[in-house]
Image (cartoon, grey):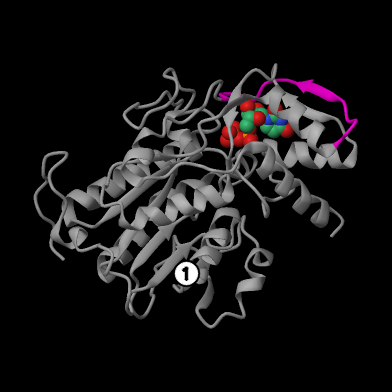
Amino acid sequence: MTATRWKPWGSPISEWAGRVNKHSFTNNRRVALVAGGAGFLGSHLCEYLIKRKWRVICIDNLITGSILNIKHLRNYPEFKFINKDITQPLNIPGKVGVIFNLASPASPKDYLALPLETLSAGAIGTRNLLDLALAKQAVFIHTSTSEVYGDPKEHPQKESYWGNVNPVGPRAVYDEAKRYSEALIMSYYHLYKIPVRIARIFNTYGPRMKIDDGRVVPNLIYQALTGGPLTIYGNGLQTRSFCYISDMISGLYKLIRFNDPFPVNLGNPREFTIIEFARLVKKLTRSSSPIKFYPTVPDDPQRRCPDITRAQTLLKWRPKVELEQGLLRTIRWFQEHISL
Ligand code: UDP
């Protein structure tokens, strides 16, 4: 396909994108490729798609994902797993209607340990998937992150906020990879008229999070259940908001028919300080673990909370699962899996 001239921002999207209506995926185009499909989010998305009668091609190099997350799907004839790194050339035969890009290390612990892999996934991997979307005439849905706002100076964060990112700080490998991938996606949109969607995902939690991935949800649940001290970095007054996995997946699915290339925040707008969160975990696990304070993490965003007006008005989406309810389900899953 040849590149066209840049169009001004906000120009009507392409005819091709406009054809993504309720009839588009009822036939043999109801095939989704999920890059990063063996990860926490990806495995839930694969499951959701299979339940809705999609054929799913799950690609993952298992660098941070796990085959255990998709073990239960491998018996479905509609599900296919390919162990592959998206930064390598992709040759996927057959039709693909939608490409979801979730392939990247995502927890601070993982991306700090895998800086070059994280940068390559955002840059080379995203480009390979965009080329595939172009070849297949597929809708391209990218999972970006609230980290594009860095340590935000505006609160809550709207999509129009450009962020406050340290490009040479430790988190830069993730933040800048995701910012680069957003720029790359918008370039493909303007040059080639690909139907693209960008979801900026805020902290999400639920069953299948890696117990040792270092994030606050698995760390504190594990510590509370095993009697160790709950580790708080800094004074615990920094904030996050927590979206339960089923809410996040339903939002991502709705993006298929979103028909808008500009980023949309997906997350839960109920904001908690980390110390409040730690007390809630203690209460729900009935743990007597002490809370212990440790030095703050460099460039740790101090306040984070999504403005989800765009998702509410355009996608007709908002999270439904309250933190207490979602945490109880997550705690139960951890209880079952810690011993394993
Ligand atoms: N955090 C903490 N204790 C932990 C893990 C994380 O106090 O054991 C803090 C961390 O410093 C940050 C917040 O919890 O302020 C959320 O961290 P997480 O790693 O879950 O994700 P982030 O939102 O920073 O990507």
Q: Is residue 293 magenta?
A: yes
Image side of residue 339 versus residue 218, left or right: right
**Helix, strand or loop for disc 1:** loop
**Residue 221, how many percent across, how many down?**
77, 40
Is 126 rendered above or below residue 296? below
What segment carries the magenta color? 286-300
Counting other residues with Cα less than 10 Å from the Cα at mark 1, is it few (<14), some (14-19), or many (20 or more)?
few
**Residue 69, how many percent across, how many down?**
65, 63
Front-most of residues 315 and 11: 315
The residue under label 1 is 52
**Image mark count:** 1
Q: Quadrant of residue 74?
A: bottom right
For badge 1, the amino acid type reads Arg
Decide if ligand 1 comes within 8 Å of the CB at mark 1. no
Residue at x 82% of width, y 23% of height: 292
Residue at x 29% of width, y 53% of height: 196
**Residue 200, how many percent across, how many down?**
42, 41
Image side of residue 55 versus residue 287, left or right: left
**Residue 109, how many percent across, how many down?**
65, 40
Q: Residue furthest bottom?
A: 77
- Asked if one can make out residue 60 in the rendered structure from this viewpoint, the answer is no
Is 237 rendered above or below residue 262? above
Image side of residue 171 versus residue 205, left or right: left
Residue at x 60% of width, y 42% of height: 107
Front-most of residues 337 and 315: 315
Q: Quadrant of residue 204?
A: top right
- Asked if one can make out residue 131 in the rendered structure from this viewpoint, the answer is yes
Q: Is residue 279 magenta?
A: no
Front-most of residues 119 and 282: 282
Residue at x 69% of width, y 20% of height: 236
